[in-house]
Image (cartoon, rainbow, N blue to C red):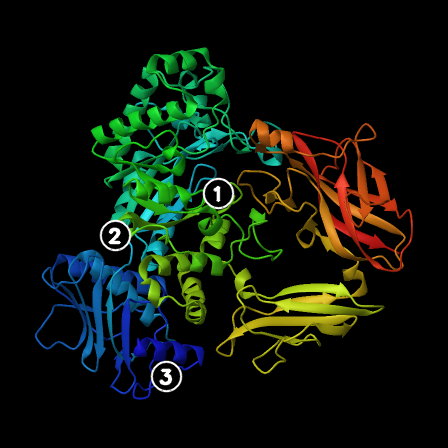
Amino acid sequence: MRRFVWLSFCLLAFCNQAHAGENAIVPSLIPQPATMQVDADAAAFHVDARTPLHADGDAAKRVAGQLNAFLAKAGRTPLPIAARSKGAHGIRLDIDADSGIPAEGYALTVNADGIAIRASDEAGLFHGAVTLWQLLTQGEGARVTLPAMRIEDAPRFPWRGYMLDSARHFQTPAQVKQLLDTMALHKLNTFHWHLTDDQGWRIEIKRYPRLTQIGGCRIPAGDAGIDPASGRSAPYCGWYSQDDIRDIVAHAAALHITVVPEIDMPGHATAAIAAYPALGTEGRQIPVSAHRGIHANLFNVDDATFDFLDGVFAEVAQLFPGPYIHVGGDEAIKTQWQASPRVQARMRELGLADEAALQSWFIHRLETLVHAHGKRLIGWDEILDGGLAPDATVMSWRGIDGGIAAARQGHDVVMSPNADLYLDYLQTDSPDEPGGRPRPKLIPMEKFYRFEPVPEALDAAQRRHILGLQANMWTTDDVRFAAVEHNTFPRLLAVAETGWTPQAGKDYASFLQRLPAWNRRYEALRVGHARTPFRVLLEDAPAGRDKATLRLSNPLGYPVRYTLDGSEPTARSPLYAAPIEATLPVQLRTAAFAVGTALQPADHFDVTAASLRSRGNAQLQPCIAEGPVLRMQDDTAQADGLRALFNVAFMQPCWRWEQAPMAGAGSIEVRAGRLPYIIDQSEEENARRRFLPARSAHGELDIRAGSCDGEIIATAPLPARPDADGFITLRAPLLRRSDATEALCIRFSGDFRPDMWVVDRVTLRP
C-alpha cells in the first residue's frame, strides 16, 4: 500500500522519471494492477527494436505473436522472437501450471536483466503481455525505459463484459473484430452480442433462411428510406453469415474473450415474426420495424413455435462454443397475449394465473431447450417475474434490485444497470455529442467508474453469485460505427478497472491521471474515441451592453487554460478559476491540460453580440422537469453525408432558452426541421404524451415568456410541410418589447405524427 501511495503521489505531482531509471516512465496502467511495486532506486531496463522476446512452447509463442501484432498496430516496431536460452537477456514469457497464479492472472517483473512474465494459463500470460504493451506504448520514441518493478495481478471478477447491439444498426465483421481487439487491450473477457430485435435479425439460421432474407432488412423512416435517384424504397439490410460468425468467434477466442449470443424473446420479436408470421400471437404479416421504443409483438406459445426456437438454438449452440445463450426476456408487453383467445386458452390449460406466469413458463421451457444443446440460459432481470428457471443467470439492467433478488435465490448475476453502465446515454453536455439519450440521465465517466457491482445488502455467501459487470452499447441512436466507438471509449476503461482491480485499489483521481495516456494509444491504434470529455464547454450569457459572462468547464474536471485574443492557449496561459467578464467581441480560445500538455486541440469560441442572440438546438434545454429526452438523428439508416441531430423531449416536445437577451429585439426567427416520429411505446406511455392543441389547420409556432404556461410573446402559422431540404424558417414579430433577459419556451402546436416539428436554431433579430 505504501508503494501504491507513492505511485499515486508521483502521478498526481506529475512525476515523470524514476531516480535511477534514466528517465524511466512512471507506469500509467488501466486497469490498475492488483499489486504493483516500483523501485525507483534500482536499475531500469531499456526496450528497443533489438530486445529479444523469448517464448517456449506453442502458447507462449502465440502470446508473443499477439504482443508484436498489437505493437505494430500501435505504430511500434515488433520485437524479434527468439528461442529461450539459459540466462537470456530480454523479455521472457513463461506458462507454469504449478505456479499458483490465479486463472487469468500473471506476475510481471522488470529488473536490470530484463522483463519476465509468468502465468499459470495462456489467458493470464496474454493479460501480462497486454500490461507490457501498455508500458511500451506509454513512452515516446523507439527506446522505452522501464523502471524496476514487480506486478502481481489477477482479475477481481470472472465476467468483465461489453454488449454490442448489432440488431438496431449493423456493424461489419471487420468493425466487430476491431472492437474485440480493443476489448482485449482493456482486459475484458465477455462479448455479449445482441443479434435479434424488432429492427433486425442479424444471424443466419440455415433452417430458416427468411430470418435474414426478410428479417435482416427494413425500410428506414425519413429520407433514408427513399432512394433519391429513383424515389423508390431503399432497404437497410445487414446480417452475419455463419462463416462470418465462426470467424468472429475464433478471433474472440484467440483474445480470450467468450462470445455470448442473444436471441431476444418473447418480446423484441418483430423481425422474426415479419419473416415467419405464424410465430406471432396475431398470425398476421407485419414489416420489420424502423421505429424505436417498446413494441407489442410477442412470440405465441404454440408447440410449433418452440420447435422453431429449438431449431434456432441448435444452430446457435454449434456456432458459439461458450457456456451461455442469452434469451432476452425484457420488455414483453402482454397486450397481445391478453387479447388472444388461443393464448388465453393455453393459459387455462396450463393452470396459469396470469401473463407474468405465462412468461415464466415460457422461459422455463426455453431453459429446457437451451440445456438440451449443452448451454446455460441467461436473460435480463424480467425473467425473475413469475418465478425464475432453476439454473438461469440474471443480467440486472433495471437497477440492481433484480440482481439482489436473484443472488438471494442462489442464482448467478451480472450487474448491468442502465443508470450506471449504459453507453448510449451521452457522457457530456457538449453540442458535439452524437446520437443518444442526453437527458435527464447523462452518464459521465465518474458515474461509470464509481459503480460498485457487489451490493452491501448481500451477505458473504450471496455475494459470491455476483459474476461481475457489463457495459451495454445499444445502437438505436448510433447510426455510424464512429458513434459506437465515441460512446464506448474511453468510458469502457472505467468498466475495465472496476471489473479487474480490487475495490480497495480503485481511485478516481489516480484514474484521471492515467487516462490521458490512453488518448495517445487510441490515436495510435486508430480507434475512434470521445474527445468531448477532454474538451472545454462554454456557457456564455449577456452581462450588459457589449459585455458577456463566460463560464468554462471541462467535463472531467481537468484544469482549463484560456486566451482572449485569439492566440492558442499554452501551459503558461491564464488558468480558469472563476467566470470571466469579457468585453465583446472576444476571440476565446480554451484547452484542458494535464501534465502541462493540452489534452485536445484548442476550442475556438468567437463571442459577439450577435452570437449571444442565437442558440442552436444543442444549446437549448427541455422545458419539462422530468421525462426522456433523446438526441435523435433525422433518420435511422446509414446514409452518405451528415444528418442533422436534434434534442427532443418526445413525450412533450418543447425547448427552453434560459437567458434570452431581449433588449433591442423586435422579432424572433426559428429554423425548424421535420423529424419522423419513430417512437413506439406502451399504451400507458402513449396516454402520457402531451401536445399543444393547434388553433389552425397546420398548427403554429408558439413562443412564451417565463414558462410554457406564460405569456405568448410571438406566434406564426406553420406550413403543411417543410421546404425541399426538410427545414423551414419562421419569422414572427415580438408582441411586446423588453430590456431584460428572459427565459423563452418554444413549442409547435398540433400532433403531426408520424412526423413532428423540431427546433434547429432560434435567433433574436433587431
Residue plotted at (73% across, 50% down): 656
Q: In which quarter of the image is residue 363?
A: top left
544 on left or right of 448: right
Whether tag 3 and tag 1 are in contact, CB under 8 A, the answer is no
Query: Could you say whether the residue bearing mark 3 is in a helix, strand or loop?
Result: loop
Q: In which quarter of the image is the C terminus?
A: bottom right
Amino acid type of the residue that numbered disc 1 sits on in the rendered structure: Thr
Q: Is residue 287 left or right of residue 604?
A: left
Q: What element carries label 1?
A: loop
The earlier-in-sequence mark between 1 and 2 is 2
Q: Quadrant of the N terminus?
A: bottom left
* Mark 3, residue position: 17
Q: Can residue 655 be seen in this view?
A: yes
Q: Can see residue 230?
A: no
Q: Earlier in the sequence, mark 3 or mark 1?
A: 3
Residue 581 location in percent, x, y? 75, 73
Residue 256: give its label: 2
With respect to residue 182, does 220 lie above or below?
Answer: above
Disc ID at residue 475? 1
